[in-house]
Amino acid sequence: ETTSSPPFGATLATLSKLLTDSRLQKPRIGIVCGSGLSTLVKSLKDVIQIPYSQLEGFGTSTVAGQRSMLAFGLMGKDNIPVVAMLGRFHPYEGHKPVTVTYGIRVMARLGVKDVIITNAAGSLTPEIPVGTIVVIRDHLALPNLTGMNPSFGPLTSPEYPRFLPLGDAYSTRLRRLAFLSSHDLQFNSSALAEGTYAWVAGPAYETPAEGRFLRNAGAHVVGMSTIPEVVAAREERMEVMVLSLVTNMVVIPEKYRSIKEEVEAELAGQPMQVPEIGTASHEEVLAVGREKAEVMRALVERIVERVPMD
Ligand code: HPA
């Protein structure tokens, strides 16, 4: 199979033309903003926003609640230059792996060393309630294990390792900074947790059996993004941190409601009271994203301030 190489040269040329402020041309940190988390752009000073439609190699994000822009700006009291993707691409939208990971690879070519990837995720355990930010320490990617790894196929650069190690994918240095930053901001200890992210292809939310399966396999949260970007960022030798905002609880009833028992009780003239169980919805995901966007924004800003200090 032949692979056409991604249009990095054209993208970088367009960017250097549009980034008229030279301080923005060499971003130190890259940020990916997930569902409802694009308000992060409010942290940026002297911002230049470039719609993906003006950039070769980028797609168009089709998910409600996601913008489609690359934002360059200065962040924090030391004016650290950063680049942020407002809106990302998911395989479930029909985007190819090369598009899903393109923004990350462009960041690497701009000189970014550390990437902070945010997302909205469902919680698989009552110990991690809605509103918690989970600092990801490991992942469980069923698609990767079954031929949907973004690097499946011919190597697209001789620089990439054929067998990418992922045992150290989540930078301990950056994860430490997340908890130190939470302390700086006087967040309650329960505001941040640590855990394992399960990547599913989506776009349907999990059935109870699927949620239980992922929980039993050791995952704490589940989502439909991020992992292709993590893989690409590690291929590009950048350090990675992932922050998942828990927007909903995945419905995992301990016991199934028995329709058989209910019907038999009804026929015996003793109908049972049965509680309704909830279900995940994109509206709920966006609402919690909006509610907690400010917390995520403050945390990311503080982490960015701390990165060059360590
Ligand atoms: N499942 C998968 N992806 C998600 C969820 C979920 O419950 N919530 C936000 N993204």
Image: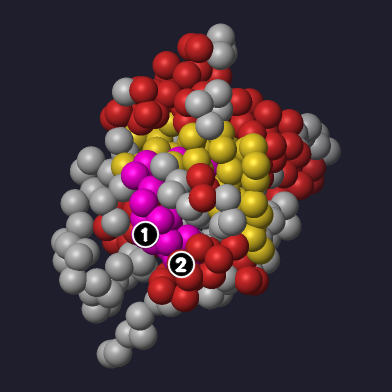
Residue 259 seen: no
- Are discs 1 and 2 less than 8 Å apart at CB? yes
For the residue labelled by badge 1, is the local secondary structure a helix, a strand or a loop?
A: helix
The residue under label 2 is 12
> Which residue is rendered at x = 63% and y = 71% of the image?
54
Task: Give the image location of residue 249, x and y in percent.
Answer: 60, 36
> Which residue is rendered at x = 47% and y = 56% of the image?
200
Bounds of the magenta span? 100-118
Residue 91 falls inside the magenta stretch: no
Number of numbered tags placed on the structure image: 2
Crowd tier of the residue under label 1, counting other residues whose Cα lies within 10 Å: few below 14, some 14–19, many 20 or above:
some
On the rendered structure, is 121 left or right of 175? Answer: right
Which residue is at the far right? 269
Residue 154 to residue 270: above or below? below
> Which residue is rendered at x = 59% and y = 62% of the image?
18
Crowd tier of the residue under label 2, counting other residues whose Cα lies within 10 Å: few below 14, some 14–19, many 20 or above:
some
Ligand 1 near label 2 (Cβ, under 8 Å)?
A: no
The residue under label 1 is 109
For the residue labelled by badge 2, is the local secondary structure a helix, a strand or a loop?
A: helix
